[in-house]
Image (cartoon, grey):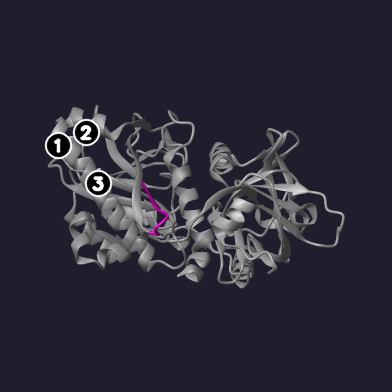
Amino acid sequence: MTVSLLPITIVPIKMFQSNEYRIQISHSLLKYWNIDIDRPLIITIGINRVEAIIEGAAIMKEEIKLSENIFQEFSLPIQENRLLASYSNKDSTVTFGPIIGLLTELNDQEEGPDFRSVHTFCEELHDMISNIGGFFFVFQLKDWTEGKLNGFCFQNEQWQKTPVPLPDVIYNRIHSRKLEASPSFQKFKTDIASWNIPIFNDQFLSKEKVHQYLYSEEHMQPYLPETVAITEADFQMMIKKYPSLYIKPIHGSQGRNIIRISKINKKLLAEMSTGMGEENTRLFDDYTRFYQWFKPYLKNRTFLAQASIPLMTYKNRPLDFRILCHKNFRDSWKATSAIARISADQQFVSNIARGGEMMKPFNILAILSNRNTAIQQLALMKELAVEVASIISQRAEGLIGELGIDIGVDQNGKLWIIEVNAKPSKNFEGQDKKIRPSAKALIEYCTFLAFSNVTIKEE
């Protein structure tokens, strides 16, 4: 991004001419931006804009004073707000931002809203944005009505619902596939597109499509376990070919509805994670009997069969690695954080939601191999994850700014891509830091999107 951004505190002031929009700027900032005070100044916040009369003032360079009616016009709380600002001399416009809206489901309670699994994360985003400059709020789908928006802002140590500006960018954290596929959400996406508001991670990723995106790149094929959409013929082929398989719904998440099939003599042992009936394991005399039991599940959803790779284990428990990737200020992918995930006892999936345990990846790799190998393997994992993120974001529809890539290491040290998540959990990152790396990375990408149009103007 080539545009220059300054942290500015905007301060509300009362004006005698209540029907006029006025802005007071320090003489030093007028000179720095080379502003002609005889020209009206366009003020842009979010996607709205007003034209204001400029006044030079003996105030700090880091402050800009705006008449209260400007705050009201932009649906900003009438209080000091720290924002980032950019000035375009070409069209006499000062742009304040980023204005970031996080869309999710929430439980509205007497003691305040509960943003469910992202509640703590929303507090982190607020804290960081307040510190570096910007305006952050959380909203749900029903808060959008005909181009107007209400949202929850953190004020006076609590989340309060209030009218908010139409944002520069929307970060989608809806957890329900059903809601995301609903007509109301599709209409919402159409509405915000008409306002030119970008929304990123606007959909869950299908496991089948992810595999297709990656398999279409020849250099990625060695990292992919053989995977097929289940038809009777293909499934029978996979059963014959491999001693063990995973069966996964293409729209599954958090380790639910996964079956591991293992051959025991001539019989098939099916181990279920959750959601496939009350029993955790079932033994079938042969393939035909298993398929008769499984076939009803195919009526309502599509499943994939994936070859089981003999991955590294820790204390005889399955182990994989979650690499979190984000787009940055230059619209390029980077690996933001990594964690090792160890399955709970008697579980074959390593998801934290299924009771898995977390460790620092370097520590566990060093235990299972040695320090030098651990350094090399972790670096290769991050490099592979960034390549995966880049391919998927290029091929999938819509904007993608965040992905969680699950990578396994087999007993020979070879890397395997297990899964890719468009809505990675915020509970797996360590809490040893007040602000997690993913919060910093998301704000960086939101800032890029918020000021990208300004960049184009400047260029």
Q: Which residue is drawn at the image coordinates 54% and 55% (left, top)?
A: 172
Mark seen at residue 373: 1
Q: Position of residue 327 (x, y in %)?
A: 40, 55
Q: Quick one: SS at disc 3?
A: helix
Left or right of 153 in this view: 129: left
The answer to which of marks 3 and 2 sits earlier in the sequence is 2
- Do labels 1 and 3 touch, CB within 8 Å? no
Q: Secondary structure at mark 1?
A: helix
Q: Quadrant of residue 241?
A: bottom left
Amino acid carrying label 1: it is Thr
Distance from disc 3 to disc 2, alpha carbons, whole Å, reads 12 Å
- Residue designated by label 2: 365
What residue occupies the far left of the structure in this picture? 412
Magenta-tinted stretch: 324-331
**Distance in Å between CA atoms under marks 1 and 3:** 12 Å
Please state which of residues 295 and 118 is positioned toward the viewer in this rendering: 118
Q: Earlier in the sequence, mark 1 or mark 2?
A: 2
Which numbered disc covers residue 381? Answer: 3
66 and 160: which is toward the camera: 66
Between residues 324 and 210, which one lies in front from this camera angle?
A: 324
**Residue positioned 36% across, 58% down in the render:** 332
- From this view, report whether residue 283 is shown above or below residue 247: above
Mark 1 near mark 2, Cβ–Cβ under 8 Å?
yes
359, above or below 107, in the image = above
Q: Earlier in the sequence, mark 1 or mark 3?
A: 1
Q: Is residue 332 visible?
A: yes
Amino acid type at circle 3 is Met
Q: Is residue 329 magenta?
A: yes
Within 10 Å of the Cα at label 1, are there few (<14), some (14-19), or many (20+) other Cα atoms? Answer: some
